Structure formats: C-alpha cells, structure tokens
Image: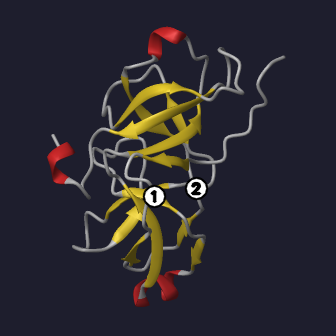
Amino acid sequence: MANIDNPNGFQLISSLYGHSELVQGNVYKAAAVLNIARGDAVIEDGATAGKVDLAVAASGLLLGVSNDILSLTAAQALVGAPILFYPALPGNVFEGQCEGTYALTYRYNACDIIGATGVMEVDENASSTTVIYVIGEDPNTEIGANSRVQFIVMKSSFYPVLAD
C-alpha cells in the first residue's frame, strides 16, 4: 500500500535523554508577517540577535522544531511573541515525511529540509546544507514515495558543537 502524501512538518518522536524539555524563545520580525506552524523547523533570526524565525531550505543551522502555532501580523511581529520549541540537541530524534522517493540507501546520510509553513519535509536526496541526518524509517511506512523517516539535527545553533 502506498504512503499517503501528507507533509505536516516534523515531530519529536523520542529523546535519548529520556525526555525533552521545551525551550521558550521569542520571535520578532521588523514589519513582516510571520507564520510558524507546529512541526516547523526554526532558526535563529539572522537580522535580530536572540530571536527565532522560520527555517527555509537554505538554512545552514537549525535551532529546533516548533511546538507552537504563531500567526502574527506585521504590527504584532514588531512587538514580538513567545514560542515554544524542541531544541536541536543530538539526542532528540524527529520524524518527517520525505519530499520525494526514499530508498534505503538514504539511511545514514545527511540531507536537507524543504517546504514552507506547516508542510516542511525531509529533502532526502539533496545535500547542499545537510542540516539533518537520517537514522531510520518509521516502522509503519513503506519504502518509496512519501516515506516517513527518523532523523537527528546535524547542524545546530542551539548546541554549537553540532555547528559547522
């Protein structure tokens, strides 16, 4: 049976620490609308030090994965808002859907993320930023199109030892 195409971001599925604490950050955008969905990868804002922003495919370091839903107008974003996220720690294992066709040869390989708010996916065959590292497959997935895989964050701004 084929996998359903249902990109819905990333979920924390386990932690080698026994549990994972949520971390509170703050978002702030200078006169820009900001939308972050639960399961979106987040980064440190490049324009405003100490603030959180939505990750994109070209992001070189990940801060974590959002556990909150934010929808801010430009005026609200100027004020800022708190956001809870799971930090990009080496012991936190996340799961996400592959953007293309997954093969077992992608296991134990570094790759990228892709997508937009609410529909982030693992870009299993891309290796320009290599921010995540695939460590396995969801046991309930079929190998092929839209497979769900388990991964760790390989390049983290939260845990600088993992930064390039």
Where does the N terminus fall, quadrant-wise? top right
- Above-or-below relation of 83 to 2: below
Task: Return the x and y of residue 66 as percentages of the image width and height.
Answer: 50, 62
Task: Return the x and y of residue 148 as percentages of the image width and height.
Answer: 62, 30
The type of residue carrying mark 1 is His
The type of residue carrying mark 2 is Thr
Most foreground residue, 7 or 160:
160
Lower position in the chain sequence, tag 1 or tag 2: 1
Residue at 52% x, 11% y: name it.
Answer: 104
Residue located beneath label 2 in the image: 117
Residue at 65% x, 15% y: name it.
Answer: 143
Relative side of 84 to 87, left or right: right
- Above-or-below relation of 91 to 137: below
Residue at 30% x, 38% y: name it.
Answer: 154
- Above-or-below relation of 81 to 25: below
Badge number at residue 19: 1
Task: Return the x and y of residue 5 as percentages of the image width and height.
Answer: 75, 32
Q: How far apart are marks 1 and 2 (CA)?
A: 26 Å
Relative side of 163 to 77, left or right: left
> Do the residues under discs 1 and 2 have CB atoms within 8 angstroms?
no
Where does the C terminus fall, quadrant-wise? top left
- Above-or-below relation of 29 to 93: below
Residue at 42% x, 85% y: name it.
Answer: 80
Q: Which quadrant would residue 99 be assigned to in this image?
A: top right
- Which residue is most to the right? 1
Task: Return the x and y of residue 72 as percentages of the image width and height.
Answer: 56, 79
